Image (cartoon, rainbow, N blue to C red):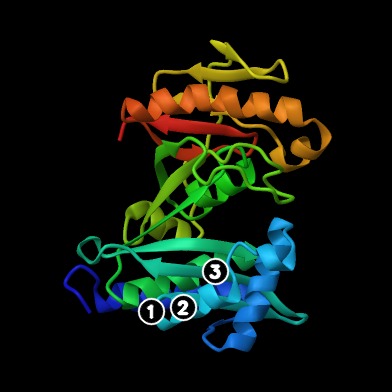
Amino acid sequence: MTAQVTESAVGHAAAVAAAAAGTAGVRIEAARDPGRLHAVSELLGQVWGTSPAQSPLAPDVLRAIAHAGGIVHVAYGATGLVGAAAAIFGPPASRSLYSLAAAARRSDRGVGFALKQAQRAWSLGHGVTSIAWTFDPLVSRNARFNLVKLGAVAREYTVDFYGRLYDQVNRDDETDRLTVLWELTSHRATMAAQGLPLPDDAPQVLEAFLRAPDGGPLAVRDEHALWCRAPEDIVALRHRNPDQAARWRTAVRDVLVPAFAKGLVAVAMTRDGWYRLENP
């Protein structure tokens, strides 16, 4: 245990993780043996819509992660494996963990939240105080989960982070990513872990200075924040209208890249799809 992580913080995080698993109706464990890791790899491939040979994390990579001291959490429900999350340590001096992937078969039953709380509890128990990962800024439900449900923030935008990916989620779109930082003992993370609401009000000024590809407002400012709207369901839009999906990519990029360059931080995603960016 390090001076930065108290016994009480670890115990509280473990209790929160257990409660979240109970609410989701799952049992969460650490996986190390090849058989279970093969099943995790297959699950990730199913969620991302890849062929079995092109899973986001192959079984041998998952085995190496576990063997190197990282962690692969698995969630089991009544029907078997329903979710998984894998993470590795960042640079030792930063006391950080890097989350490589997290997925659940269903997004509306609390499995993802339970997995991330288990990851938080495990991390604090190993002296880790922050976890970082990336996500597609156009996927508004992931943005809301990361920024509001977990209490993380986004500070960095990278254009075409992975290069082109040919799966059912990315559909050959450019892979722009926001980097999330989850400070595990912060007020935001602690509030979110307890299910207490974080501010996620919609913008008060709806006169846009930029228009979105669907003709609606894209970006507005009020006295407190810069707001940027994301599409309602970019994954479905990529299947239905890939040209408009590509225009959304460029439009949101053109707002967020200069905003992050000025030092703004994404702190929320509203229920109707607006990013809130503030001065830290």
- SS class, disc 3: strand
State the mark number for residue 221. Answer: none
Residue linked to disc 3: 85
**7 to the left or right of 192:** left
Q: Residue at x 24, y 74 (%)?
A: 6
Between the residue at mark 3 and the residue at mark 2, the CA separation in whole angstroms equals 15 Å
Q: Are marks 1 and 3 in contact (CB under 8 Å)?
A: no
Percent position (x, y) of residue 177? 50, 42
Q: Nearer the viewer, mark 1 or mark 3?
A: 1
State the mark number for residue 64. Answer: 2
- SS class, disc 2: helix
State the mark number for residue 68. Answer: 1
**199 to the left or right of 54:** left
Percent position (x, y) of residue 66? 45, 80
Q: Residue at x 68, y 17 (%)?
A: 216
Between the residue at mark 1 and the residue at mark 3, the CA separation in whole angstroms equals 16 Å
Percent position (x, y) of residue 238? 75, 37
Between the residue at mark 2 and the residue at mark 1, the CA separation in whole angstroms equals 6 Å
